[in-house]
Amino acid sequence: MEGDLQSHRDGCASCDIHAPSQPPEYPFQSTVVDMLQLEGHMYMAYADRLTGWLEVAHFPHGAMSSRIISVLRRTSQELISTDGGTNLISEETMSFSRKWGVIVRLSSAHYPQSNGRAEAAVKTAKRIIRSNIGKGGSLDCNKASLAILQYLNTPPKGFDKSPAQLAIGRQLRDGVPTPRQHYKVERHWDEIIQKRELQMAES
C-alpha cells in the first residue's frame, strides 16, 4: 500500500504544484524567477535554488510575455517559483511552460524557501548591476559581464564551492588571473565525462 501511495504521489503534477517546497536534488531542477526595476530599467533575475547560479536579463522595451519567454527558452528548469508578476504568469507564458513541461508555482507564505531564494536573487542582481550597467541600462557591456562572472566564481559565505563549481564542475574564466588548473573539470565530473565519451564511442 505504501508503494502504491508513493507511486501515485510521484505521478501527481497537481501535488507537485501545491506541496510544500522541497530541496532540489540536482542543478536547475528548481529555479526562481523575479522581476526587478533599477534606475527606471526593467530586469529579470533567474536563479537556481541548489547552486545559486544567477542570470539577469534586461528588457529595454518592457517585460512583455514574448520577451520573457525568449529568455526562459534559453534556460533549463523543471519547476519555476515566481511571485506572480503579470507577464510571468500570463496565458502566453503559462502555455509556453506547459509545452516545455515546466511547472510554474506561485510563491506564497507556504513556500518560504522559494520566497527567500527569489528575494536573495533580486538583491544579488541589483548589487551586481547597480554600478555596472551600460548605456540605457544595458547588460551587454564588459563591466556587467565581468561582475556576473565574478559572482558565479565566488563561493557564498559558509561554502567552499562557487555557483559555477556546483553547476558545471569548474571555475569560469573572468577578469581575475587564476591558475589554469581551476578551469579544469573536477575529478568526479571528469570521470563522468570520460565514461560518457567511451559509451558514445561504443555506440
Image (tube, helix red, strand yellow):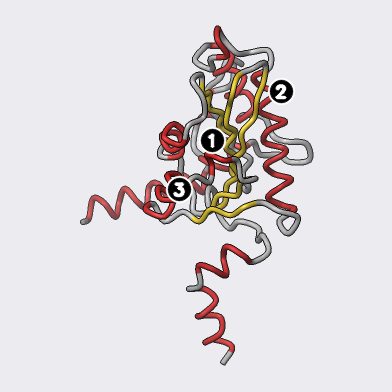
Residue 195 horizontal side relative to residue 202, left or right: right
Res 99 label:
none
Q: Which residue is mark 2?
A: 127
Element assignment for label 1? loop
Q: Which residue is mark 3?
A: 91
Q: Amino acid at mark 3?
A: Glu
Element assignment for label 3? helix
Which numbered disc flags the more N-terminal residue, 2 or 1? 2
Q: Quadrant of the N terminus?
A: bottom right
Q: Is residue 144 above or below residue 107?
A: above
Image x and y of residue 90, in percent: 49, 45
Which numbered disc flags the more N-terminal residue, 3 or 1? 3
Give the label, 3 or 2, closer to the camera: 3
Q: Amino acid at mark 1?
A: Arg
Image x and y of residue 127, in percent: 71, 23
- The quarter of the picture where residue 75 lies is top left
Picture residue at 57% right of the left edge, 40% below the top: 86
Res 170 label:
1
Residue furthest bottom in the image: 1
Picture residue at 62% right of the left edge, 65% below the top: 18
Depth check, front residue: 164 or 76:
76
Q: Amino acid at mark 2?
A: Arg
